[in-house]
Every structure is written in structure tokens, then in C-alpha cells.
Amino acid sequence: MPTPRRAIAAWVLYDWAYGAPAAVITTFVFSTYFTQKVAADPATGAAQWAGMQAVAGLAIALLSLPLGALADRGGRRRAFLAVATALMVACTLPLWWVRPQPSDVWPALLLVGVGTTAFEVATVFYNAMLPGLVAPNRIGRLSMLAWGAGYAGGLVCLGLCLTVLVFPKPPHFGLDPAQAEPVRATALLAGGWLLLFGWPVAVFVPDAGRPQPWRLALREGVGELRTVLRDALAVVPLRRFLIARLLYMDGLTTLFAFGGIYAAGQFGLTATEVLIFGIGLNVTAAA
């Protein structure tokens, strides 16, 4: 039975929604604001940001495999994705209250750490939906369409951050520049963007398989995971590919986590210039 077009559209739209917090919070705007304005000094802020990203990375590594196995065997990918997305929104919106003072460092780091973990765990369930949407020979096409939509979503959201919140002088909505409110408001925009465009995937994309009891689904999922890993590691070219991709993705993750921080710290870019930098990168990435 062909997948309804609205399910495919909802799946692609989620990447459009998901690209906004990645661009605004993790890569360009909030990370730069944290190191430049919230932390005691930029060097300390960069170290604190790196430490929390490392903690989040460990949590992602520990959670992704069992949760993915549970979702696959339990037939609840949609529910897991909805919970992870709600957690992302719940961690993004309160970043508005992070003021430019060192006393707000730890609330900011905790919100970003939990939000980053939820962000990456959500991709486990999101990507697992793809094979059930189209035939195998169309998976690559749909995947790249959604990938491009993610960068386009980040691009549009960054553009709104620049033109509506950061660039206007005086700021719209009575925002106080002395308290960095135009920059802080980008968290409200990113969280609202995710909520606005992310919900259709939890409504229109069907779950694969029949739901099973939690304990049975986890036991079968972990058993299947062991078999897959054992078979994959037995194939030498595949083992080399997995190790190489691990190292490659570590490098990319570092670039994503520190792009805005590096631009502001080493080249002295302002919040407006970092946004323009982010827009330029998203234009080329989407293309």
C-alpha cells in the first residue's frame, strides 16, 4: 500500500523544523552569546560549552542504541520522536531567561545539554521512519530532499533572527539591547519554529509494526542489535567504513558546535555578523 503523500510531506517538514534549533542554538547564535556574554570570559565559556557537549555526547551514545532497539521492536517510533521533540522545545524556550551574567551559566548549560541529547536521540526515531515511507530505490532521494529542507529551514529561521530580532535599531517588541534581549529572543523563535513545523510527523507518519510490551520489545531489540553489530563487524570493509565515519563525524560535530564561537572569538564577529555568516553557510549547505 503506497504511503500517503501527507506522511512523506510531514516527514520532510520535520527536518525543516529540526534545522532551526541546530542553527540558532547549537552552531551560531546562542553558543556565541553564551561564550561572549554569559560566561565569565570567552575562554572559560568555550571550555564550559565543550564540556557540556562532551557530556551530552556520552548520554547520546548510551541512550541511542537501547532506545532505538526498543522503538524498532516496540512499534512506537512516533511516540518516542514526539517525546524527544517536546523535550527539545521545553529546553529551548527557557533559554530566553538566560541573562548576560555568570550566575546563569549552569542553567544555560543544563538546558543546552539536555536539549542536545534530545535533539540527537530524536534523529534515531526520525531516521528509522524513512524505510517505511518509500521503496528502497527512492530512499536516497527522499533523504536528501529532507536534508536540504533542514538547511533551508535553518536558513529561513536565521534570516528571521537577523531581520526581525537582531538587526533592527531600535529593536522590535520593546526588547532591551542592554540585557541582550534581541539575541535571547532567538531561542523563543527557534523553539516556536520547532513546535510549529515539527508536530505533523507525530500525526501523519504511521508507525511500522505492531506495538509490543516494553520488556519484550527491549529484549528482542537488544538481541537483534547484537546480531547486527556482530555481522557488521565481521565484514572488514564495513568495519573500516564505520570507524572512518565515526572519526569524520567527530570532526563535523566539533565544527557545528564551535562554528559561531570560533568566528566571534578569533575574528571578532558581532552577533549580526555571526548570523550573516550562518546564513551564508546554510545557503551553500542547502544547495
Image: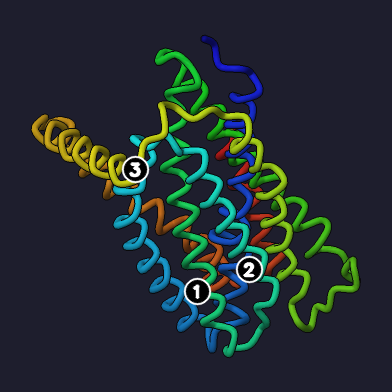
Q: Which residue is mark 1?
A: 110
Residue 70, label in figure: 3
Q: Secondary structure at mark 1?
A: helix
Residue type at mark 1: give it.
Answer: Leu
Q: Say if 267 sits above or below 118 in the image.
A: below
Q: Quadrant of residue 229?
A: top left
Asked whether disc 2 touches disc 1, contact meaning CB atoms under 8 Å apart, the reply is no
Mark 2, other Cα within 10 Å: few <14 / some 14–19 / many ≥20: some
Residue at image point 57% right, 57% down:
88
The reply to whether the C-beta atoms of the residues labelled 3 and 2 are less than 8 Å apart is no
Helix, strand or loop at label 2? It is loop
Taking the view exactly as shown, the residue that stands out farthest to the top is 1
Which quarter of the figure has residue 100?
bottom right
Q: Nearer the viewer, mark 3 or mark 2?
A: 3
User: What whole-number distance in Å separates the C-alpha atoms at marks 1 and 3?
Assistant: 26 Å
189 and 213: which one is in front?
213
Question: Which residue is pictured at 61% across the width and 17% down the height?
Answer: 4
Q: Earlier in the sequence, mark 1 or mark 3?
A: 3
| Horizontal side of residue 223 vs 107, given as left or right | left
Residue 155, percent across and down? 67, 45
Question: Can you tell which mark lies on residue 187?
Answer: none
- Relative placement, left or right, of 14 versus 113 is right
The answer to which of marks 3 and 2 sits earlier in the sequence is: 3
Residue 286, horizontal then vertical, whole percent: 59, 36
Q: Measuring 62% from the left and 73% from the top, which residue is drawn there?
A: 33
Q: Which residue is mark 2?
A: 269
**Three-letter residue code for mark 3:** Leu
Looking at the rendered structure, the kind of residue marked 2 is Leu
- Residue at the image point whose x is 47% and y is 67% from the top: 113
Q: Viewer-nearest of labels 1 and 3?
A: 3
Q: Nearer the viewer, residue 257 or 21?
A: 21
